[in-house]
Amino acid sequence: MTERVPDPLDESLLYDPAADPWAAWVARRARQGLELPEFRRAAVLAALSLERPARLLLTVRSADLPTHQGQVAFAGGKLEVGETPTQAALREAWEEVGLPPQQVTLLGELDDVFTPLGFHVTPVLARFQPPAKFALSGEVDRLLLCTLDELRATAAPPTTRTLPDGRSYPMYEYFPQGVRVWGMTARILHDLLEAGVE
């Protein structure tokens, strides 16, 4: 007798955010915000599927974009006037990959990060029911749906980068499905992978 594979729709219908270990993890964290008034505000959606095991939604950016061509990133972008980070993350996920907001359960905001290009980014943690079909915008070449174990297995040893002012911080890299994940995306990934939640 073969074991039944859980259907993602079944998982979503049974989903109880109050019983989700990711919801408990983000609720008990002391979130680290940033005050960078000279930086441009942005948000990304760190979305884990309602599957067993859960898969993290990442995008590979189009080679036709003016910046960050071919890089791996979370769905996300700049905040529009009057938007909160959560609203921006949901809007960008819908625009970039066709993830309907009504199929997303928001769990909370993660630690703010910044980029050398002057963006102050708030990652928003969420669970999602995979749609029947994703609709990729011209900004996205393809999707990566990676389990956390897959990401952990492809981690490179961290290196250290020293800033001109003498401060040092770790740099992380992952290589799922033959692509390189680095920079801000890898910093957010590291936070999730170190959470101890499966």
Image (tube, helix red, strand yellow):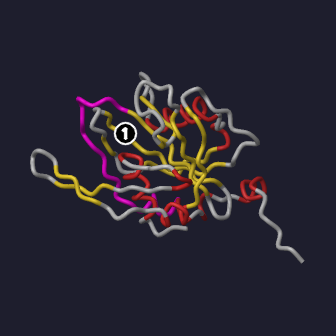
Compared to 191, does 64 lie above or below? above
In the picture, measured across the screen, residue 69 lies left or right of residue 172, that is: right
Compared to 28, does 100 lie above or below? above
Compared to 78, does 56 lie above or below? below
Residue at 34 percent of width and 46 percent of height: 112
Q: Position of residue 147 (x, y in %)?
A: 58, 60
Q: Position of residue 42 (x, y in %)?
A: 40, 34
Q: Residues within 10 Å of mark 1 (few under 14, many from 20)?
A: many
Residue at 47 percent of width and 26 percent of height: 65
Quadrant for the N terminus in the image: bottom right
User: Does residue 91 belong to the magenta stretch?
Assistant: no
Considering every residue shown, the one lying at the far bottom of the view is 1
User: Does residue 35 belong to the magenta stretch?
Assistant: yes
Q: Give the residues drawn in magenta, as a range.
A: 23-41
Residue identified by numbered label 1: 121
Observer-nearest residue: 2 or 101? 2
Quadrant for the C terminus in the image: bottom right
Observer-nearest residue: 171 or 110? 171
Q: Quadrant of residue 52?
A: bottom right
Considering every residue shown, the one lying at the far front of the view is 178
Q: Quadrant of residue 135?
A: top right
Label 1 residue SS: strand
Considering every residue shown, the one lying at the far top of the view is 81
Residue at 60 percent of width and 39 percent of height: 142
Observer-nearest residue: 174 or 11? 174
Q: Position of residue 94 (x, y in %)?
A: 61, 33
In the picture, measured across the screen, residue 177 lies left or right of residue 119, that is: right
In the picture, measured across the screen, residue 98 lies left or right of residue 165, that is: right
